[in-house]
Amino acid sequence: MATAPLYPVRVEAELAPHLSRWLWLVKWFLAIPHYICLVFLWLAFVVLTVVAFFGILFTGRYPRGIFDFNAGVLRWSWRVAYYTYGALATDEYPPFSLGPEPGYPTTLEIEYPEDLRRGLPLIGWWLAGIPHYLIAGIFAGGGWFAWSWGAHWSLETRGGGVIGLAVLVAAILLLVKGTYPHGLFDFVLGLNRWVLRVSAYAALMTRDYPPFRLDAGGHEPGAVM
């Protein structure tokens, strides 16, 4: 059976076998140092994305240093979201790092695009992306729209959305039964994977249009395990 080709934005994750029933109640407090760091990182992300916009427009290339930094911000944000209310799938405290951190229960990798269309910032970024931005907004909540149109955003400032509702169900099940159903985890990861793909596309970090496909589960379709 044919497998789906790997998208340049790849999310891998493992659901922790044992999760605390109650720790999720205070993770918002425990993650405050990360939130403070992410405020400044995302301000830099927005400014550098504007710089990258003009770099792509005039040279057709995403400045490598800016790409690595921006990928690190997305990576850091995703780890914090995975620990807190974007997934609640681990109790392992996320590292203060822009790097890959392969030992953490989830990873986010974005392939560096060797060549980008010069017109991508003018057409592909906003016009072609509108359908995905609408869907990602439904999945992640209203806060996602602010980021997608250029304001500060992080994976933790979204409000509501399908992901928020699914994670709320997971939190209640953890509190009452002490379990996080694998089927629910797979669904939550699929939603987050979609949003992360669109986020990278919106930040001009890939020329590949995100697929309209919910790839549920902790592992990318077609990935070699």
Image (tube, helix red, strand yellow):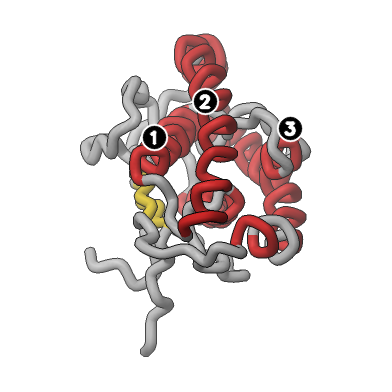
The quarter in which the N terminus is drawn is bottom left
Q: Where residue 179 sits in the image (x, y, percent)? A: 47, 38
**Within the image, what quadrant is residue 121 found in?**
bottom right
Residue at the far front: name it. Answer: 58
**Within the image, what quadrant is residue 115 found in?**
bottom left
Q: Where residue 149 sits in the image (x, y, percent)? A: 73, 42
Dot 3 crowding, Cα within 10 Å, few <14, some 14–19, many 20+: some
Q: Residue at x 56, y 16 (%)?
A: 28
Q: Examine the rendered structure and indicate whether residue 126 appears above or below residue 6.
A: above
From the image, tell me which residue sits under label 1: 69
Kind of residue at disc 3? Gly
Taking the image as shown, residue 26 lies to the left or right of residue 147, namely left
Kind of residue at disc 2? Ala
From the image, tell me which residue sits under label 3: 159
From the image, tell me which residue sits under label 2: 44
Of the numbered discs 1 and 2, the one sitting upstream in the chain is: 2
Residue at the far bottom: name it. Answer: 1
Secondary element under disc 2, as helix, strand or loop, is helix
Kind of residue at disc 1? Phe
Q: Nearer the viewer, mark 3 or mark 2?
A: 2
| Res. 130 visible in picture | yes
